[in-house]
Amino acid sequence: MKIGLYSPFMAENIGGGERYFLTVAECLLNEGHQVDLILQTDFHRDSLGREKLKQKYVKAFNLNLAKLKIINGPFGRANSWWKRFQFTRAYDVFYYMTDGSFFIPGARCNVVHFMIPFKTPKGGWLNQLKLNFWPIKTANSFFSKKILEKNWGIKIDYVHWGAVNKQDFKPLAKKEIILNVGRFFSNSGGKHCKRQDILVEVFKIMCDRGLKGWQLILNGPIDKGEDNLSYARMVAQIAKGYPITIRHEGEFDKVQQNYGQASIYWHATGYGLDENEFPEAMEHLGMSTIEAMAAGAVPVVIRKAGQREIVTEGENGLFWETKEELIEETLQAMRDKKLWQKLSINAQKRADDFSKDKFCQMTKKMFGLSKD
């Protein structure tokens, strides 16, 4: 079949959403389908630029995208609804990762995916009307499904968790490392900030109270924008003088090593915010937590949104809500070796629920490509 994938976020970012979208592409390519990744009209119009973009994603995500075709489509302010409709008619399936806006598609099967649990519908009644032309609606987590169904008045047909290939994230000889992986966004305007600043503050408190031998590693690129750069610089400034390493390069092999060696994984997205009032600022699922669990790191994560969907407290991880709770739970995992061993083993087992095989099975089911 001929399948088109379009996301307005592509060509700009390297993050969980992009990994998710391209894993869908890999699954379909492995089934022998023709897959087009579609960019906006003014993105990477030359073939050399598109090939460089593909290699960038292969390097970042370790995916087999050799047969993926990257093309430009009529998406952007200058293109009419009719051009989009005519363009999408060439596809058996058209898959759209929405930024909250919609258009009228012409493919035989049209699937829209919500990666973000937008609190309120965007664009008024006309945008809502266009949503009716997308009969299959999917979301990345049950948290996103709950927010969207409640606030948008729509039915989410499938929850499609992201995929973690356990072959990519294996336990190595563990070191006294606390890890966090995630892009650097500013903590302003309800952004999806990972709150690396809070993690640095807490780790500094622990060091000042006598913690020795441990290091904190923050690994993730800086999102575009001066405010995001300023935030990253602020985090680096407050980390000075402590055993804290910050890496922005994002090479996959280095991230693999960090996961494999880390004993504890921290997550703080959504700190200080109500998840119903600010759902977009939460961790909608949290693939980095699952990757860490696959590598045997014990998750000590915030008790909010998608993290509750992944971790079962006391079985395969620990939760916190305040800075003091983060300190207490982390110290418990550090000092109680039997507890750490139990949580680590169970965390690796839990990661199996997010396997690429299960992800691909759901992809085929959503697109009407499975036999069952």
Image (cartoon, grey):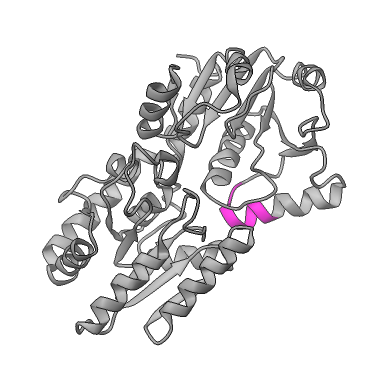
Q: Which residues are magenta?
A: 56-63
Question: Is 153 inside the magenta-drawn segment?
Answer: no
**Residue at horizontal 81%, vertical 37%?**
41
Number of numbered discs overlaid on the protein picture: 0
Asked if 47 appears above or below 117 in the picture, the reply is below
Q: Is residue 194 above or below residue 132?
A: below
The residue drawn where x is 14% and y is 72% is 335
- Residue 172 in view (yes/no): no
Q: Residue at x 62, y 26 (%)?
A: 95
Please provide percent x and percent y for residue 331: 17, 70
Q: Position of residue 275 (x, y in %)?
A: 33, 41
Whether residue 348 is visible to the viewer of this picture, yes or no, is yes
Quadrant of the image for the C terminus?
A: top left
Q: Position of residue 109 (x, y in %)?
A: 62, 15
Q: Position of residue 148 (x, y in %)?
A: 43, 26
Taking the view exactly as shown, the residue that stands out farthest to the bottom is 241
Question: 368 above or below 271?
Answer: above
Magenta span: helix, strand or loop, mainly? helix
Quarter that holds the N terminus: top right
Horizontal relation, residue 80 to residue 361: left or right: right
Q: Is residue 219 shown above or below 153? A: below
Question: In the drawing, does residue 260 fall left or right of residue 368?
Answer: left
Residue under the point 82% across and 28% down: 79
The answer to which of 171 and 183 lies nearer the viewer is 183
Query: Is residue 62 in the magenta section?
Result: yes
